Image: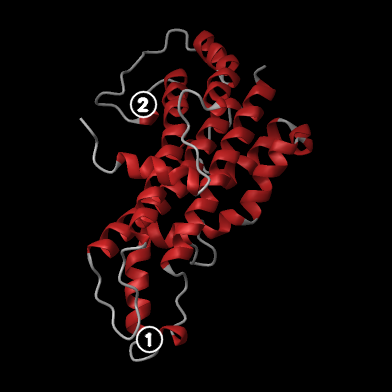
Amino acid sequence: MEIPLAKEVFEILPKIGIKVINGDHPLLGELLGHCSGLRSYLLKTEGAQTRRPLLANTFWDIIAKYRLDVLTQDIPKVANQLAYAIAFATLYLDYIAEAGKAYFPNAGNHFFWYHIDFGLRLASSGWDRIALLLDLAYELNTGTKCGLATVLKEIPKKDANIVKQNDFKELKKFRDNWFLDLEANAGEGARHEATHLLSPSSRFLFEFLDGYGKTLDEVPLKLSPKTQRDLLIEHHGFYVSGIGNAIRLVLLRWP
């Protein structure tokens, strides 16, 4: 039985330069292989710890090895979910009613912005999962305070030489630059706004209302629909590269 829209989605992905992380993607094998040393260590050190199932327990209740197993499944899954969200947004981009002197959202608008809203949350939360992986590998134990900025600050305290590693430099460069697009920066930033204050779709609507009566060229929209979609494509690339950087740092500590 043909799955609705599946053909269209998988035709769009290569056109926008995105590859799904599936069985033939090299990053998947690297993720599992580079984390095998860490997994062996965690397996040996779990000792007499009670192996709580994830059923009826939270992520923080299960043992470290189990958390690693969850992360190695979830990290590439988030990348793929973001890829699908981008593909669906691209699919509906040609069908949205653009804001001009009037703005009457149609079904294309609703489906486009649904995937933009969802995609931005994925682009944000993927980095939390990368941070959790590095926290495990470097035994930082930052707990619920774990995040990319915290982890990259704490790792050099465990390994001072890591600051010389290109993978660490790349993650730090992302943190100090493009991550600010997603993080709260002086009360702004897409991550902070989308997860706590305002969805991109609502921002677009109210920016139009604020500029009502002006021509589209006179309305200073923060991000147009296409620019929002292109931003997610860019951050999908950042996230996939970040996975590679992170797992090589795991391998460095647990060869």
Q: Amino acid at mark 2?
A: Asp
The residue pinned by badge 2 equals 61
* Rendering colour mode: secondary structure
Name above or below for residue 128 compared with residue 249. Answer: below
Q: Is residue 83 visible?
A: yes
Q: CA distance from mark 2 to mark 1?
A: 50 Å
User: Helix or strand or loop: what does disc 1 sit on?
Assistant: loop
Going from N to C along the chain, the mark reached first, 2 or 1, is 2
- Residue 45 in percent (x, y) is at 52, 11
Task: Classify the position of the C terminus by image quarter.
Answer: top right
Q: Quadrant of residue 51?
A: top left
The residue positioned 23% from the left and 34% from the top of the image is 2
User: Helix or strand or loop: what does disc 2 sit on?
Assistant: helix
Q: Amino acid at mark 1?
A: Gly
Report whether 67 appears left or right of 241: left
Report whether 206 appears left or right of 41: left
Task: Classify the position of the N terminus by image quarter.
Answer: top left
The residue positioned 32% from the left and 82% from the top of the image is 209
- 10 Å crowding of disc 1: few (<14), some (14-19), many (20+): some
- Residue 66 in percent (x, y) is at 42, 20
The residue positioned 60% from the left and 29% from the top of the image is 247
Q: Quadrant of residue 55?
A: top left
Report whether 150 appears left or right of 11: right
- Residue 216 in percent (x, y) is at 41, 83
Which residue is farthest left? 1
Q: Nearer the viewer, residue 105 or 249?
A: 105
The residue pinned by badge 1 equals 211
